[in-house]
Amino acid sequence: MTRATLIEQIRLKQSYLCVGLDTDPRSVPPFLQSFQDPVFEFNKKIIDATRAHCVAYKINTAFYEVSGAAGWETMQKTADYIPSTHFKIADAKRGDIGNTSSLYARAFFETLSFDAVTVAPYMGEDSIRPFLEYTGKWTILLGLTSNSGAADFELQAHQDGLLYESVLRKASQWGTIENLMFVIGATQAGWFTRIRAITPDYFYLVPGVGAQGGSLKEISGQALNRDVGLLVNASRAVIYAGTGEDFAERAGAVAAGYAAEMAGYLNKHASVS
């Protein structure tokens, strides 16, 4: 999916919501357990209930890899079921030497046909370059994460700022606003003004809204740019909004609530831009 198409979908739906299909096999409602693939049945219902309110889906591969070959098949079926109008993200956080990264890129961009994959940048450009070489695909690079361990490296002083800032500046030279995004954790909302100053035109994938406590209002106020520039992910808050037979309807209602809130921020942003 091109940048122009992504922006078009955001404008059309007045939403920059990404729904995280981080489906724990142990959390699938009991009434779905009789299906041959309970996780896939769960995901289908979530997708059907939320597709009108979001522009992207993010699949954290660990939730599928834990089930071995069957989980990989479920992931592939889920990716195929996501409508082509929606941006498909493999949250795999890959990053290795060039030859290995080339195979990772082929796995997610050719075998599974995702639009984007998350990557870890700390092995340098040659570990990221194979992902960036795919036309029409996106590399989403870890920028500033919201876990406590971010203090170990990302928030350490480096050159004229912090290490994560050096990563943003350096990685911006590897890709362009057409094929590179950054992961910025929602619980780091206070940093967004500083981050936007370094990467003014890039899209950010922002996890951590909802169950992790990130503020959609704060993020939107500080990080929206002229092309929106945000995909805000909510996983547990949406997919586990209910546990009964109406779980999908409840998920749809939560997604609709996020979308309505986002529409307000988009209108407000447009009026002051």
Image (spheres, grey):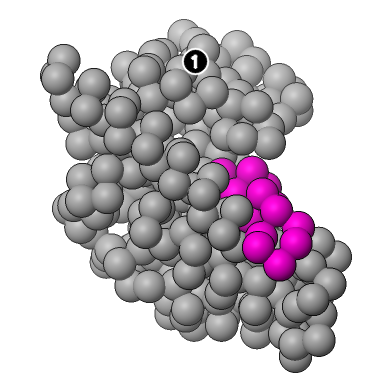
Type of amino acid under label 1:
Trp
- Percent from the top left, x then y, of residue 55? 36, 54
Judge whether residue 267 can be spotted in this image. Answer: yes
**Element under disc 1:** helix
Query: Which picture quadrant has residue 92?
Result: bottom right
- Front-lying residue, 132 or 222: 222
The magenta span reads 234-247
Tell me the quadrant of the picture where the N terminus can be found: bottom left
Q: Residue at x 59, y 26 (%)?
A: 214
Judge whether residue 102 can be spotted in this image. Answer: no
Q: Residue at x 37, y 38 (%)?
A: 260
Query: Which picture quadrant has residue 148?
Result: top right
Q: Residue at x 85, y 65 (%)?
A: 26
Q: Does the magenta segment cover residue 236?
A: yes
Callout 1: 10 Å neighbours few (<14), some, many (20+)? some
> Which residue is under mark 1?
191
- Percent from the top left, x then y, of residue 122? 59, 41
